[in-house]
Image (cartoon, rainbow, N blue to C red):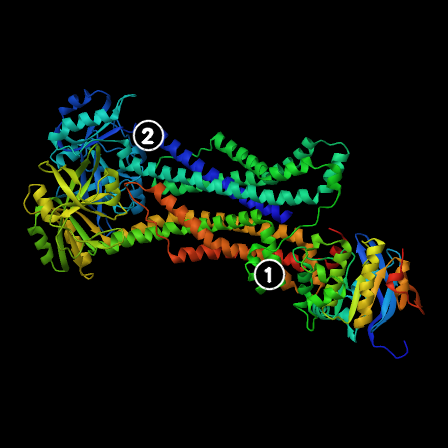
Amino acid sequence: MNQPKENIFQVRDLTKIYHMGEVQVHALRGVNMELYAGELVVLLGPSGSGKSTLLNIMGGLDTATGGFVSYRGKNLTKATEKELTDYRRYHVGFVFQFYNLISSLTARENVSVVTEIAEHPMKPEEALELVGLSERMDHFPAQLSGGEQQRVAIARAISKNPAVMLCDEPTGALDSKTGVLVLQALERINRELGTATAIITHNADIADMADRVIHLSDGKIADVTVNRVKKSASELVW
Amino acid sequence: MKGQVFAITLVVISGVATFVLFNSTMHSLDYTRSKFYRDCDFADVFVNLKRAPESLKETIRNIEGVNRLETRVAAHAKLDIPGFKESVTGRIVSVPDDGPPLLNRLYIRKGRLPDSSRDNEVVVNETFAEAHGLQPGDQFAAVINGKWKKLTICGVALSPEFVMVMKPEAVTPDFKRYGIFWMNRKAISRAFDMDGAFNDAVISLYAGARENDVIRDLDNMLGRYGGYGAYGRKDQMSHRLLSEELKQLKTSARIYPIVFICIAAFLLNVVMSRIINTQREQIAILKAFGYGNFSVGMHYAKMVVLMITPGVIIGIVAGIWLGRMMGGIYMEFYRFPFFLYRLRPEVFLTAVVVSVLSAIGGTLHSLRKAALQAPAEAMRPEAPERYRVSFIEKTGLGRWLTQPAKIIVRNIARKPVRAFLSLIGIAVSCALMVSSGFFRDAVDFMVRAQFVLSQKEDMTVSFTEPTSYRAVYELKRTPGVLDAEPFRSVPVKFISGHRSYKTVLNGIAPESKLHFVLDRKLRSISLPPSGILVNDYLGRLLDVKPGDLLTVETLEGSKTIRQVPIVALAGQYLGMMGFMNLGALNRLMNEGEAVSGAYLVTDPLFREKLFESFVAMPRVSDIFIRQNEIRNIYEVMAKGMLFFTFIAMLMACSIAFGVVYNSARISLAERSRELSSLRVLGYTRGEIAYILLGELALITLIAIPVGFFVGYWLCAYIAYALASDLFRVPLVIELKTYAQAAAVVLGSAVVSGLIVRRKLDHLDLVEVLKTKE
């Protein structure tokens, strides 16, 4: 972290209020944070701490109630529907807890879904190679294990060469051994391609592989810690 | 769900409504007819003859089976209605001088029967009175037996004999130009020199009497009095037309409701399988609590019944409403004193039972699945959907498909039965539209064949009696007549083996430039110097083909029976008749150069004047103006057809909408997660709409040509079912009709697509990512 890195995301005073019937839920209560190019950040917090809401707003999936999020100087909170679609299409890679693969398409085709519409994509085969799935490219989701499905999702996210990867509980539905394999894939991509990566988790053990750990609690940032020594994903156990 | 239930309700309404509409109209018409026949003592057997002494009455009465007999005098008349400058003719029928008729009693709508002391009073039939706004007290002139006579209307009436008033040999009813007039027997006998004689009789039979035997005895007895042949009710014009109408209703009552019931069952099946799938867990919980298979099954069965109940109720109400409306349309043509609307309880019950049974039948599979699921199994989420590379892609086409296109193709391939049934549903709606347009095309074609291609004359003049050729030459010399050709028209009976048919044999001038006999492909057949042509339907009825000998018994003048070779079969859609060379027909009749009338080409400037002079000629019995005939056909057809087309269009739209909307909603429900995922990945609203609706668009586009094909065969069946000696519906479907059908189906598909598209635009991207399917 010697030279100044490009500031990809800037989050200022971000608030989000959900209306659940008569009840108002304050999911975010004034969040301030940055995400820099090439870094791997873990957003850590218990469920209900607002981390998913933060990620969804950063990913252009949800709107904020107050404050702003800017991506490379562009204010996402003021973006139109079309601008947000373009933003998701060309700049962000998503990985979700439940993979969200298209079950009627093979692994290769699930990646092609993205490469077909991206601006500077890599080859689907290349992306699957990166996550170690060269051998399973023509399998349908129903024929893949959970870990494999999640790695297809990662390949799909990375194949568009995004500036940032947003991962929401990527290991949440997996056992620890498979989870490590998935995290290794994310780690490798961050290292080899330099893609800024934000991982949301409630699993504190995963925090050890991050450059920085942002602790969220009750809709606010409680603490930010920097790991002097990063653990490799393969060293993680939980 | 609201939208889907609405779509199903639409289809159920259409099905139940058409079922109730056609069945109740059929029953009402049948019931009204028999009530009217009974009330007014409609005769069983009818006789026309030249002239017989009144004393013959006793002999006829002695025929076994004859119950009541009424002799009458009936004759043709030309009329001059004030303010109406066109040819008007009518049939005058006598009523007894001493009270109402014994048979075929009149139902007096206004006024009264003629006063026996007056010879100028006349009762007119209702359609004619209405068409000209005539009231009791109004007067008009008639040429009766060559003499002008001023007549005064004393009443307006209906008769079971003339429920449908149609001029013999006419194609459609023409209420303005043809009427029925009832006069005192004495008055009409005097005018026609029929004192102490009769030329028409109506007979009722005892129950159990053998009609055919009575007719045979009558024919034997009346032959020498110039009998044209007795006939039973089934050959009586008005009764025939009514029966044909009932036959058409029966065909409709059979076809349309079945289509709807099948489609409603299919839609329910799709919706219920989806509901049951999403409620697996609730089912499991219920069963874990100890609910039995039967009660779980019953729960969903009740739900199905609940879902169709509004449709059944509204359908019955709509069916009754439409039935009364259709009854009203019928009453414009078929005149009964009253229209007794009848919804038989069994129609009502059948509608309910069939709807419920087919709805449950359609959902039985899903219900069984729900009832038989082991609780633990149901608690687990459904196994991930299995897909395969589709057959189409394996042919090498896959390389050219984008990922969204692959999603579409594989989804269809994964649920082929559902896709196929959707396809059939949309195809059926397209076919219905084709069948509704088909009637218009068929009428256009009939008119073209009958009035444009085979008739070049614009006026036809008939003489009261066969006349010499000279009369035609005289007509030709009349100023304003550009061309004239003679024709001969003879009532005959064609006999082949045990089959026979009474009709007219037409003699046409050799090398005629005005009147042509056409074959099936509308090519003119040249008339050979000898031999006979009959139209193909008559040929089939008599089981004869070109080369066979046909026995021709003439029923006019010196009756002859000859064997004549058939030279060809003609294509003809209206009526059934034979054609011969004029000279050959004269020879067959053992007569000299006799003609029945002439075909004329006239100068439009002189037409009205010519017409007036023909009306004034005592020898001229009738004048046909081609233009009026054509106009009249369209006027008559328009009313009935508009209603039918309207109904068909409603039905087609409700099916197309129901099927497309339902499929789209189900797909949306099943795939919202997948589509949201694609939105998250940066796919635009348009792009995911393409994936969802592309599947339906593809099915719709394939369904349309299939619908054309089904529609063609549906029309072929309709044409086959409606074919009778009165008319045959040509199987002609114009390009325009296909285009219209496609447009309506596409329109409904697009509308339902747009509604679903709106839902699609409001997908909650965040919500869907949180849950595991």
Q: Nearer the viewer, residue A83 or B633?
A: A83
The type of residue carrying mark 2 is Tyr
Residue at horizontal 35%, vertical 43%?
Answer: B720
The answer to whether residue B146 of the structure is visible from this angle is: yes
Percent x, y for residue B466? 10, 44
The quarter of the picture where residue B370 lies is top right
Compared across the picture, whether B461 is left or right of B23 comes to: left
Percent x, y for residue B488? 13, 46
**Looking at the picture, do discs 2 and 1 lie on one chain?**
yes
Label 1 SS: helix
Label 2 SS: helix
Chain designation of label 1? B
Label 1 environment density (alpha carbons within 10 Å; few <14, some 14–19, many ≥20): some
Residue at horizontal 62%, vertical 49%?
Answer: B3
Q: Which mark is residue B624?
A: none
Residue at horizontal 26%, vertical 33%?
Answer: B113
Q: Which residue is mark 2?
A: B37
Mark 2 or mark 1, which has the lower sequence index? 2
The answer to whether residue A65 of the structure is visible from this angle is: no
Label 2 environment density (alpha carbons within 10 Å; few <14, some 14–19, many ≥20): many
Chain designation of label 2? B
Percent x, y for residue A59? 77, 66
In the picture shown, does residue B445 fall above or below B224? below
The quarter of the picture where residue A179 lies is bottom right
Q: Looking at this rendering, what residue extends furthest in the left direction?
A: B592
In the picture shown, does residue B772 fall above or below B688? above
The type of residue carrying mark 1 is Ala
Q: Nearer the viewer, residue B89 or B550?
A: B550
Residues at circles 2 and 1 in contact by the CB criterion of under 8 Å: no
Q: Nearer the viewer, residue B692 or B352?
A: B692
Q: CA distance from mark 2 to mark 1?
A: 66 Å
Q: Which residue is mark 1?
A: B405
